[in-house]
């Protein structure tokens, strides 16, 4: 198989770019002489097109390893000069960036292997580079913190023994089973700071926090407080008597105001308008649960009778049905003759 067959596939080096190739058996190197065809280039300064060559510079670029041979390109790197403004610049090429010794794809493979459970030594050996090169590439990878927090956030520690800290902290998304981030140390203040670096809205997106640490985190205080208010409102059901209910609501609204939670501000306005109906709702043993039950019965009735086209008959059937549901109403509905 000719070497050009895979140089194009692996290193983006087309056969027409390769002028010659030699093998250095003692060094286990496969050396390719590379020169790109002359092509009109746009001047980065004035956008004027040019094919005027300024000079060449021979560069040695490591492309990668194939069959234990290091593939090296002796790249005759061309510089163009702009006829219009006099600016000179390097030609564009698909395989190596400026001032770099490793090809773009070679780096890509190297970085990819950093995602495998391999030691630095093993990676260095695989790519025939030094361990410091491997570490340098790893350090170049800057991973930003996630843009948002998950709905179900899990916080746990693990023994990482990194940077003088015994434990590191791992944040995971319990729903998707993915790692959100790794924090350098198990330190309440640091974790708080990290969580608070997300704005309030993003923190509010978190609905459940599974905190496996013994430290109590206040970053989710808002959620805890909102939940608490909801819970306390529910306790209203255990309060009887108009005055007591009204009193309880007053206290509860005081708590809502004190919480300063934006989400509740609308609710405070609603209470101003609907205060009495709300008190009455808790006072009277009525709810719309009964109506809902009736609607369900009517739905069943319609289905079993293949639709009722005559309204009056329909009405009566519903009322009889309703009477069966409410024993008191039944008496009123029954024709007197039946009673006597
Ligand atoms: Zn120019």
Image (cartoon, rainbow, N blue to C red):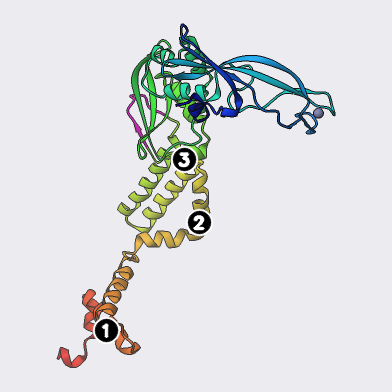
Neighbourhood count class around disc 2 (C-alpha, 10 Å): few under 14, some 14–19, many 20 upward: few
Position above or below: 313 against 175 = below
Viewer-proximal residue, 87 or 265?
87
Position above or below: 302 against 148 = below
First to last magenta residue range: 209-217
Q: CA distance from mark 3 to mark 1?
A: 50 Å
Question: Which residue in the protein does label 2 denote?
Answer: 270
Question: Which residue in the protein does label 3 denote?
Answer: 204
Viewer-proximal residue, 218 or 245?
218
Question: Which residue in the protein does label 1 denote?
Answer: 317
Asked if the magenta segment contains residue 49, the reply would be no
Q: Contact, CB < 8 Å: mark 3 with mark 2?
A: no
Q: Is mark 2 within 8 Å of ligand 1?
A: no
Viewer-proximal residue, 126 or 307?
126
Provide residue 263's location: percent of width, then percent of height: 50, 47
Provide residue 307's location: percent of width, then percent of height: 31, 83
């Amino acid at each position: 198989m000719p070497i050009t067959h895979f140089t194009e596939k692996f290193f983006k080096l087309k056969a027409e770019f390769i002028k010659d190739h030699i093998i250095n058996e003692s060094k286990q190197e496969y050396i390719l002489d590379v020169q790109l065809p002359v092509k009109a280039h746009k001047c980065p300064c004035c956008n004027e097109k040019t094919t005027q060559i300024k000079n060449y510079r021979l560069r040695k670029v490591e492309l990668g390893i194939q069959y234990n041979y290091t593939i090296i390109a002796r790249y005759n790197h061309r510089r163009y000069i702009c006829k219009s403004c006099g600016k000179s610049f390097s030609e564009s090429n698909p395989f190596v960036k400026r001032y770099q010794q490793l090809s773009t794809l070679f780096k890509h493979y190297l970085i990819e292997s950093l995602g495998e459970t391999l030691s630095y030594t093993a990676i260095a050996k695989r790519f025939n580079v030094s361990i410091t090169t491997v570490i340098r590439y790893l350090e170049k990878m800057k991973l930003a913190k996630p843009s948002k927090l998950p709905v179900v956030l899990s916080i746990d520690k693990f023994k990482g023994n990194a940077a003088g800290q015994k434990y590191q902290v791992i944040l995971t998304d319990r729903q998707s089973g993915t790692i959100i981030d790794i924090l350098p140390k198990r330190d309440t203040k640091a974790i708080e700071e990290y969580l608070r670096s997300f704005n309030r809205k993003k923190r509010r997106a978190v609905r459940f926090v599974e905190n496996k640490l013994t430290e109590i985190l206040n970053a989710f205080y808002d959620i805890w407080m909102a939940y608490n208010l909801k819970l306390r409102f529910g306790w209203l059901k255990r309060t009887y008597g108009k005055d007591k209910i009204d009193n309880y609501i007053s206290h509860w609204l005081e708590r809502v105001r004190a919480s300063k939670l934006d989400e509740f501000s609308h609710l405070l306005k609603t209470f101003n308008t609907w205060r009495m109906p709300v008190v009455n709702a808790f006072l009277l043993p009525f709810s719309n649960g009964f109506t809902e039950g009736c609607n369900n019965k009517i739905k069943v009735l319609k289905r079993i009778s293949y639709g009722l086209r005559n309204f009056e008959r329909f009405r009566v059937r519903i009322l009889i049905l309703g009477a069966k549901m409410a024993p008191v109403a039944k008496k009123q509905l029954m024709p007197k003759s039946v009673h006597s």
